[in-house]
Image: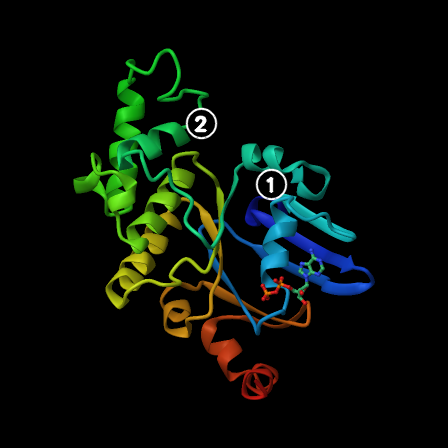
Amino acid sequence: SLQERYMLKVEGLTVSFDGFKAVDDLSFYVEPNECRVIIGPNGAGKTTVLDLICGRTRATDGSVKFKDHELLKMREDQIVHAGVGRKFQTPSVYEDLTVFENLEISYPSGYSVFGALAFVRSPNVQHRIAEIAETIFLEDLLDEKAAFLSHGQKQWLEIGMLLIQDPELLMLDEPVAGMSVAERKKTAELLNRIIQDRSVIVIEHDMGFVADIATRVNVLHQGKMLSEGSMAHVQADPKVIEVYLGH
Ligand code: ADP
């Protein structure tokens, strides 16, 4: 059924800031195991779309269905709890904690290294942390303080801190900004691993990276959907070429 086929259904999504429509009647559907990439010129409304989906910004109109939930009626924390994770552009890891501890405090059981039961590390949690550390290429750095990681490794750690909460949909804002070519390659590999059992929405500017990760691409322009489809499709779309050459 449609309900099962689509993980996320965005319909007529609109937000006005003082009469200015930053996102204007936007509709798109995301399937399970998909990496959807949102591209478009600065000011197109890309970040605002993610802000609307995660409840950070209130929509003026429309609907965002995630599985059985209407996200537009939910608070930010309820949306996280429902299984939508969001990573912002700047890494926000705990610099004074190790990689292990950063993952441990992100484990969603209320369990905390700062809590009274800090000495009890359940084998399940340990196993999950080891698994995630391997996925994010940090398995050899579990005891390293986050402060000593490279910028790229911090970005991966933050993705790991989201993955340990087991979201079904992960939203990432320019995940390879500031990364080396080698780190970009590994991040593409990481995203391809992640979509084996979840979906991802990524905002991205690096077209080489987009080509490596995208299942489908949404091109936004002035808050509207200019083009949607495979990378090859949107690249060949005259409307897209016009907007990008015009900049
Ligand atoms: P993008 O991420 O594609 O660069 P944004 O989503 O950040 O674009 O912004 C889209 C437009 O909405 C921009 O013109 C921006 O100035 C405007 N905008 C975003 N958030 C707000 C806000 N909270 N109040 C007023 N205008 C905003």
Residue located 37% across and 73% down the image: 208
Disc number placed over residue 213 in the picture, else none = none
Mark earlier in primary sequence (2, 1) = 1
The amino acid beneath tag 1 is Lys
Secondary structure state at the residue bearing disc 1 = loop
Disc number placed over residue 108 in the picture, else none = 2
Q: Nearer the viewer, residue 143 or 24?
A: 143
Crowd band around label 1 with a 10 angstrom C-alpha radius: few (<14), some (14–19), many (20+):
some
Query: Whole-percent x and y of residue 151?
Result: 32, 54
Residue located 77% across and 59% down the image: 17
Q: Spatial distance from mark 2 to mark 1, Cα to Cα?
A: 20 Å
Q: Is residue 152 above or below residue 168?
A: below
- Quarter holding residue 121: top left
The amino acid beneath tag 2 is Pro
Q: Residue furthest top?
A: 116
Residue under label 1, please give it.
Answer: 67
Q: Nearer the viewer, residue 52 or 152?
A: 152
Q: Residue furthest left?
A: 140
Query: Whole-percent x and y of residue 11?
Result: 71, 55
Secondary structure state at the residue bearing disc 2 = loop
Query: Whole-percent x and y of residue 148?
Result: 24, 45
Residue located 20% across and 34% down the image: 143
Q: Nearer the viewer, mark 2 or mark 1?
A: 2
Query: Whole-percent x and y of residue 111?
Result: 41, 20
